[in-house]
Image (cartoon, grey):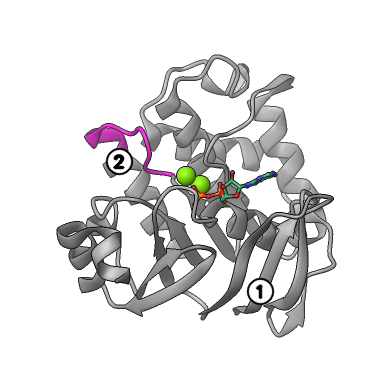
């Protein structure tokens, strides 16, 4: 479903190369984890798949359902069913979370479902997240705690029903209870047949998920791939030893 082919990427208008030939294939319904040290270009990879204009593809391609999406805008990619949660979600003053969800849903899926039905779906997801009552009436992420922001991201992911979900450090800064809640949402999203790419530093969230493949990522490249046991190995030995 997703094919990243020999992807070389630099920062637009600057001579900074960040991705140095990434190759990655994710089939429908699979969950792949990318693990790698700080500053290795993991968020850049996520942003490039989503079409962040800050970055420029110098070489290679990104295919979704066999078609190149490399030159599509971010909203066009979103309409194809790709959704990325931010490592550091933006605060958008003046935009109520609830309105944001409804507007985004209709932009992607059209207006065949009534606001009543959509709001009921939102409420039913919200009841599983354990957040304060006024969560949805607040402006998007404004004044949210770190954990609330991450729960807000996973709420969007579940509500918008993406076909490919990219999770950039969704587990960072979560306490044990919040981690379990977020992991359970990821598992529910997967039941819709969604493919998942999860970027994380720690094995702990992977313990709750059914992982198809783990990739070690350094210097803008995937340097090793394996099954779940590779995550164990990383935790025991650290990246430096693993990459050699
Ligand atoms: P990771 O998510 O693995 O921690 P990032 O993708 O955030 O890594 O960043 C990789 C490297 O690219 C870092 O050195 C970072 O400073 C640099 N970088 C990322 N985005 C930009 C940008 N827009 N301008 C300049 N440097 C950037
Ligand atoms: Mg980082
Ligand atoms: Mg990052």
Q: Can you see residue 15?
A: yes
- Residue found 20% across the figure and 72% down from its top: 229
| Element assignment for label 2 | helix
| Residue 69 screen position, x and y as percent | 77, 71
Residue 18 location (% of width, % of height) = 62, 59
Specify the segment rendered in magenta.
Answer: 170-178
**Location of residue 198 with respect to 69 vertically, above or below:** above
Asked if marks 1 and 2 touch (Cβ < 8 Å), the reply is no
Mark 2, ligand 3, within 8 Å: the answer is: no
Residue 111 visible in the shown view: no
Residue at which label 1 appears: 7
**223 relative to 161 in the view: left or right:** left
Considering only vertical position in the picture, is 71 above or below 25? above
- Quadrant housing the C terminus: bottom left
**Among the two numbered marks 1 and 2 on one chain, the one whose residue lies closer to the N terminus:** 1
Q: Which of 223 and 152 is in front in this view?
A: 223
Residue at the far bottom: name it.
Answer: 66
Q: Which of marks 1 and 2 is in front?
A: 1
Spatial distance from mark 1 to mark 2, Cα to Cα? Answer: 32 Å
The residue depicted at 60 percent of the width and 66 percent of the height is 163
From the viewer's perspective, tell me whether residue 43 is left or right of residue 7.
Answer: left
On the image, the x and y values in percent for residue 16 come to 70, 54
Exactly how many numbered labels are in the figure?
Answer: 2
Q: Mark 2 points at which residue?
A: 179
Above or below for 36 versus 174: below
Instruction: Look at the numbered disc 1 and say if its residue's Cβ is closer than 8 Å to ligand 1.
Output: no
């Amino acid at each position: 479903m997703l094919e990243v082919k020999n992807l070389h990427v630099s920062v637009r208008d600057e001579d900074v190369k960040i991705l140095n030939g990434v190759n990655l294939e994710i089939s429908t319904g699979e969950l792949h984890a990318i693990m790698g040290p700080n500053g290795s270009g993991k968020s850049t990879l996520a942003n490039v798949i989503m079409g962040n204009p800050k970055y420029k593809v110098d070489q290679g391609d990104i295919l979704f359902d066999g078609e190149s999406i490399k030159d599509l805008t971010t909203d066009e990619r979103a309409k194809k069913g790709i959704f990325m949660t931010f490592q550091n979600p933006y605060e958008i003053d003046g935009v109520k979370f609830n309105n944001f969800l409804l507007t985004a849903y209709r932009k992607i899926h059209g207006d065949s479902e009534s606001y009543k039905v959509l709001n009921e779906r939102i409420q039913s997801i919200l009841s599983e997240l354990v957040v304060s009552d006024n969560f949805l009436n607040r402006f998007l992420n404004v004044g949210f705690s770190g954990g609330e922001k991450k729960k807000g991201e996973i709420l969007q992911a579940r509500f918008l029903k993406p076909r490919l979900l990219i999770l950039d450090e969704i587990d960072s800064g979560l306490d044990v209870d919040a981690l379990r809640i977020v992991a359970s949402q990821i598992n529910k999203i997967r039941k819709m047949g969604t493919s998942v790419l999860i970027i994380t530093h720690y094995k702990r969230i992977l313990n709750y998920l059914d992982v198809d493949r783990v990739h070690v990522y350094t210097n803008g490249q995937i340097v090793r791939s394996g099954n779940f046991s590779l995550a164990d190995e990383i935790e025991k030995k650290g990246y430096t030893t693993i990459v050699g």
